[in-house]
Every structure is written in structure tokens, then in C-alpha cells.
Amino acid sequence: MANLFFPMLLLLQIVVAAAISDAQHSGGLTAACKRTSDVDFCMHLLHPYADQFEDNDPNKMGYAAISAALSAAHEAQAFTVRQTTEPELCSEGRAAVMGCLKNLDASAESLRQASYEFDEMEGADEQKREVHRKNVISKIMSSIKDQKACSDSLKKNSTLTGDEILQYVGQQADEAAQAGVVAQAFIH
């Protein structure tokens, strides 16, 4: 029994240290997400980037938020591509999904451009920084517009065969758009 005591004590210390570390990471994230309109979604979206929110550095937080939005856009794209081969979709439904995919492609490109612009913000003088900041916000807004266009077009076609697939693709686009809204909250 004594042989198990020390390994168990060591395991307990590791678990407690991990819990404390996770709480510290999520503490900065929680505070940061309070500036968004949907704290729970923000926490879910940005949790993989929690360590970027520890020291309240606006550059790290902005870049993490754009990265998370781009990741959500890529997930929506990948999901949508998989749906183009679903046999339940009628030809009109497939056309709607393909149109949506074009919107999602444009959305992801806008977020890539926002990321490049955000990189240019760092180290720029005050005047150029403001120009880059406006460009970042414009690119994110363009991305959101494309994601909403995808979702709206699928909602219009929701009476087609394969309605459930169209709803799922629309939900993915809506979540990607919501990720863009979260990213906007961190651009300063």
C-alpha cells in the first residue's frame, strides 16, 4: 500500500497543477470574451488559443481571434464540400450548396487577407496602423457578409430535397459568421 502512496501523490500533484494552469489560461480568456455579445460562443471558439489571452496583449488576442475565425471558415468549407456528394440532394439543392461553397471560399480569402493586414499593423506608425486596422475590419465584415449570403441562400432553398443537409450547411456558415463577429471585437 505504501508503494502506491507516492505515485498517487505525484499523480494528484500533476492533476492539480494542470487544473490550475487551465484555470489561469481560461481566466484571461473569460475576461476577454466579456467584450463580445456571446461569451459562451467566444469561450468555445477561442479555447484552443487561451494562452494568447493570458497577458491581455491586443496583438496576440486579435491574431488569435482572426485565426479562430479562419479556422471556423475552413471547417464550414470542408463540411460543405463533403455535402456536395450527398445522394439525397436534388440538383437544385446541389446547386445551392455549390453557390454557398463559392461564398465560403470568398469568406476564407477575406479572412486570410485580414490576417495579412493584421500582421502589417504590428510595428506600423499610428497613421498606417489605423489604415491597416480599418482594412482588417473591412475584410472581416466582407467575410461575414459572404457567410451570411451562403446561409441566406440555403434558407431560401430549404424546401428542396435534401432540406436537412441544407440546414446543416447553413448552420456551419452561421457559426463561421459568428466567429467573424467575435474576431471583430478584438481588433483595436
Image: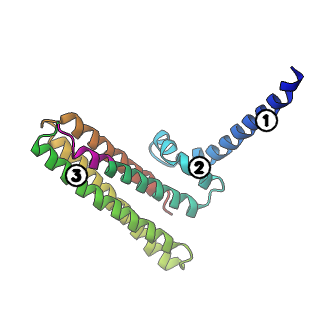
- Residue in the image at 37% along x and 54% along y: 74
Q: Tell me if residue 40 can be seen.
A: yes
Foreground pick, 179 / 186: 179
- Toward the left, the furthest residue is 91
Of the numbered discs in the image, which one, if any, rests on residue 171?
Answer: none
Note whether 147 is above or below 57 in the view shown: above
Q: CA distance from mark 1 to mark 3?
A: 50 Å
Relative image position of residue 120 (x, y in whole percent): 49, 74
Circle 1 sits on which residue? 13
Question: Identity of the amino acid at label 3?
Answer: Cys
Q: Is residue 67 magenta?
A: no
Single out the mark in the foreground, 1 or 3: 1
- The picture quadrant where one finds residue 109 is bottom left
Circle 2 sits on which residue? 50
Single out the mark in the foreground, 1 or 2: 1
As drawn, is 49 to the left or to the right of 110?
A: right
The residue range painted magenta reads: 79-87
As drawn, is 139 to the left or to the right of 83?
A: right
Of the numbered discs in the image, which one, if any, rests on residue 100?
Answer: 3
Q: Tell me if residue 181 can be seen.
A: no
Q: Secondary structure at mark 2?
A: helix
- Residue in the image at 22% along x and 34% along y: 164
